[in-house]
Image (cartoon, rainbow, N blue to C red):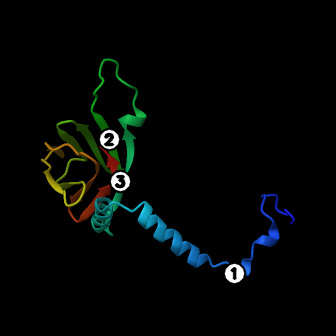
Amino acid sequence: MSDVHGNGFPEEDFDDAGFDGDLLEEELRQAAAVLDPVPAGLRQLALEAYALHDLDARIAELTFDSLVDALPVRGEPEAPRMLTFRAGELTVDVEVTGEGLIGQVLPPQSARIEVLGGPQTTRPVTVDTLGRFTSDQPPTGPFALRLRTGGEVIVTEWLRA
């Protein structure tokens, strides 16, 4: 028995002609489904998150996250999380606290905001004439914001609260 490839397995013991990669893949899928199935709640969440997408929506890029970009404030262990999203000339500043969300759309304009969460937890939020908005329900898991300004739809990326 020769060890041509240096992997410890004799080359002549492997019969490439009798190997069925598709069969192996199917057997591995079945084993994973039995031994480590995807939780039903996660599967449903994934399906509903996909259903929420807007094909014509612009994506607002996260340009600032206080968890990553800010220096810690001494004496403030529970500092609110500050987020800034940008899509073209539009900026959305959001403060995430244990009591909810506070934010502002800049430049100030009429908009409708929805806080997207888990399965069927879209919560509408009103925006005043100065672009300010509040939500008294803090996000408890992954969330995103969908803004409707005139004929345009803008969606932020999903973040974990």
User: Residue 85, position in %: x, y?
Assistant: 34, 47
User: Residue 134, position in %: x, y?
Assistant: 15, 43
Residue with the mark numbered 2: 83
Quadrant of res 135: top left
Quadrant containing the C terminus in the rendered view: top left
User: Residue 110, position in %: x, y?
Assistant: 16, 54
Residue with the mark numbered 1: 18
Residue with the mark numbered 3: 157
Instruction: Tell me which amino acid carries mark 2.
Output: Leu
Q: Nearer the viewer, mark 3 or mark 1?
A: 1
Contact? badges 3 and 1 (CB < 8 Å): no
Q: Earlier in the sequence, mark 1 or mark 2?
A: 1
- Could you classify mark 1 by the number of other residues whose Cα lies within 10 Å: few (under 14), some (14-19), or many (20 or more)? few
Q: CA distance from mark 3 to mark 2?
A: 11 Å
What secondary structure is found at the residue carrying circle 3? loop
Q: Earlier in the sequence, mark 3 or mark 1?
A: 1
Instruction: Tell me which amino acid carries mark 1.
Output: Gly
What secondary structure is found at the residue carrying circle 2? strand
Instruction: Tell me which amino acid carries mark 3.
Output: Glu
